[in-house]
Image: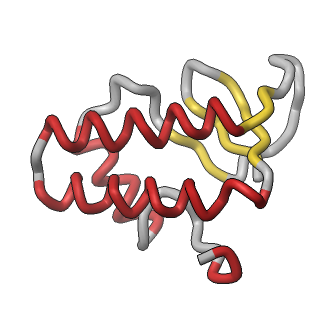
Amino acid sequence: MIMRVMGEGQFEVGEDHLNLLNQLDDELLTAVESGDEENFRQAYGKLLDAVMQYGTRLPDDALEPSDLILPNSEATISEVRALLLSEGEGVIPGFPEYE
């Protein structure tokens, strides 16, 4: 799965890390629903860190379509809430076979 983090680039994340990303996505969803800014910052930071840690960064000149686009670390809780609502169930698209 190719994930773009705005301002950071694209990362190819292998299927073996999707369970972890889905767990972090669930934590993010809970934090956003609570409206707690501190919990949101912590949960979103953990998700972004995991994408960058476990993903392989693609070259800047790569023209790969992104399966997912995440706002940068400065995104507001409102921006991420809008993304969650547009995706339906979290920011990471569901992969039931990995849950």
Q: Residue at x 77, y 60 (%)?
A: 15
Q: Residue at x 34, y 57 (%)?
A: 27
Q: Please indicate whether residue 37 sits to the left or right of residue 11 in the image.
A: left
Q: Is residue 29 shown above or below 47?
A: below
Q: Please indicate whether residue 29 sits to the left or right of residue 8 in the image.
A: left
Between residues 12 and 23, which one lies in front from this camera angle?
23
* Quadrant in the rendering for residue 63: top right
Q: Residue at x 78, y 27 (%)?
A: 57
Q: Is residue 32 shown above or below 3?
A: below
The x, y position of residue 40, in whole percent, is 24, 42
Q: Please indicate whether residue 45 sits to the left or right of residue 93 in the image.
A: left
* Quadrant in the rendering for residue 52: top right
Between residues 7 and 35, which one lies in front from this camera angle?
35
Q: Is residue 45 shown above or below 60?
A: below
Residue lying furthest bottom in this view?
96
Q: Quadrant of the C terminus?
A: bottom right
Q: Residue at x 71, y 53 (%)?
A: 67
| Count of marks placed on residues | 0
Q: Give the colour scheme shown.
A: secondary structure
The x, y position of residue 56, in whole percent, is 79, 32
